[in-house]
Image (cartoon, helix red, strand yellow):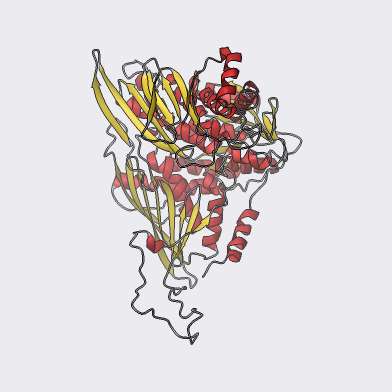
Amino acid sequence: MSRVRYKATKRKMLVEYQRSCDAMGTRFDVFLRGADEQHLEAVAVAVQEEILRLDAALSRFDPRSEIARVNREAGKTAVRVDRELFALLKTCEQGRLATNGFFDVTQGGGWELDAAACSVRLATSGVQIDLGGVGKGYALDRGREILQRFQVASALLQGGTSSVLAVGDEVWPIDLRHPTKPDFIVARIELANRGLSCSAVRHAEQEPSDIVNPLTGTPLVGDAACVVLAASAAEAEIFSTALLAMGEWQAKDYLRANPDLNLDVHWLNA
Amino acid sequence: MTITRRTFLETAGAALATNSVARVEASPVRVAVIGTGGRGSDLIRALTTIDGVELIAVCDDYPPHLEQGAKYAGPQAKTFVDYRKLLDELKPQAVVIAVPLYLHYKIAADCLNAGYEVFLEKTMCYSLAEAKKLAAQVTASKRVFQVGLQRRANAIYKQAQAMVAAGMIGQVVSIKAQWHRNNSWRRPVPVPRTDANWPKLERKLNWRLYKAYSQGLMAELGSHQMDVANWFLGTHPKRVIASGGIEYFRDGREVYDNISCLYEYELKDAQGKSYTVRANYTSLCNNAYEGAAELILGTKGSLYLTSAKGLLFQEKGTDVVSWEGNKDQHAADANAAVVTAGKTLKLSNDPWAHRGAPFEIDIAEGNDTRDELVSFIDHVRREDVKTICDANVGLMDCATILMANQSVETGGWINFPTP
């Protein structure tokens, strides 16, 4: 569960602390560096508790979650949600507008967000919100807030081995594995103070894709993968999903037309 | 008894029928939240999703927590550092209290005195004397009062309780419950240990670890689960013997990092003869095996309960004979038992195989923290003092967990205190 290594540096002993937990149907890891092991453990647990809290709120598969409540009721009537969830849904709406509909947590179904009432209404009772394309990144971003509040200067957070957030100026090397050839490392990315998300049409032995083009409603085809680096892990996840749905050539046009998005984008093709 | 889908659904219907549903009426219920740390923030988020609730104020004497609570509560909620000022200025209809345990009595008593309906987080009070005084005050005040033991609002637990009451697991013979985790139970402190403010902040944020403010694992975790035992058995324990200590996290904490308790409940069978049900409870901070769950063992079945799912395992070898005799269409005589020549039935050697496939209780829709608040608000609106977890339940739960801590201190059996 936890592993501690001591590393001598020129000035002081730095402690590394690592912890894992299962959430959002996958594995999350927290790697922290600092001077005080007891402090790092407490911070790592706080980050994990935050991830687990968000898992309980955002999982559409758990009937107890807030998002499941919205999916059950918001097709019939506007549903009041908490301010945190509303802000996240608003971010998703901004992502939808910014990507011309290629990122859409309602898969093209449509919704109405009412900021004054802090409520959401789905276009029909058939529409369901799926935060699978942003939840892991959002959880990592909330983790970063905790790290900053508790003065952990250097950390790497990852969820599902597809969303990563490096906190602090230290450079963390990330190796990218090919989506369908597990033995093949395609590239190395050096990550500092930035979020990374990798979306692939298909993973090894997966057919068809679990990513749907929201404009057409059809699953993506091919073997492409798209890696996006952005200021936050949620942004990286939103854009890696959207750009993959656009396809490489349309995505390149889109990025040329929107230079101030400040994204680094890498494409992997079979 | 063999469980058919029909009998199960009838029991389920009975349990669901008791759900209270908040009705939205013209005037909202004006609610204030006192204590906006981790648990307080959970309650604030849940309150903001309930129709007919107007969250008018949040209060905390620790600025970072107040700021966090205000963010979740929204701009309409005023912020206060001192709860007495909040009560004087705003006159809320109901207050929700989620402060460290040692402050429960004082703040809840002040709120009742000022005429407000009260939702108080578990455990009801730090000491038995306080819990008794508060319960008496609640009764005298005729105010709506609810303790935050949210399993009382959880559809799975309500269903399971109805199943036990209906005799679906036979006579309850034993209960085994645990809350096992693997972390230090320590909250981070926002300044380095060398900072002059560290000792003060450490005690404020890690109040759970110090005896002046906390009753340790039994109050923070065990109270939920021993309440399930009290609820399902319909009584309080008669006596307890417990052992606990600080064996691993020797970091200056004062409360035990592990505890084991053996409770005895005295019950009467259908013929009026008394018998004892023993409940084992353990809590660990350094092994997470089985997590948080309660296991109710009966003569006809076992219920394994968690907040997310309940599992019913039927006992084998009594009602159901596995060797069903001759159902083979090729056999000459339908009454003959069949032996397959040269073939022995082979069973799995999996250590869990004896339990068989469980019957799942998977009916939870909605989060029990939200549901307990929906129920509280509903009771406030209807001025109905019979809440799902009233002061007497809270008092009994408080006495149940404190007697275990007392047993650890004195090293012997402790009887349930006289009323």
Q: Is residue A163 left or right of residue A6?
A: right
List x then y, in percent, for residue A190.
Answer: 39, 19
As displayed, is residue A80 above or below residue B239? above
What's the residue at 38%, 61% (across, down)?
A: B353
Q: Closer to the camera, A138 or A78?
A: A138
List x then y, in percent, for residue A129.
Answer: 62, 36
List x then y, in percent, for residue A249.
Answer: 57, 22
Q: Closer to the camera, B384 or B9?
A: B9
List x then y, in percent, for residue B82.
Answer: 54, 23
Q: Closer to the camera, B120 or B352?
A: B352
- Kindly indicate the quadrant of the structure image that contains residue B316: bottom left
- Kindly indicate the quadrant of the structure image that contains residue B4: bottom right
What's the residue at 51%, 44% (across, down)?
A: B149
Q: Closer to the camera, B239 or B357?
A: B357
Q: Residue furthest right?
A: B26
Q: Residue furthest front?
A: A270
Q: Is residue B37 visible?
A: no
- Kindly indicate the quadrant of the structure image that contains residue A242: top right
As displayed, is residue B330 above or below residue B61? below
Q: Is residue A216 visible?
A: yes
As displayed, is residue B269 above or below residue A182? below
Q: How many numbered tags mark residues here?
A: 0
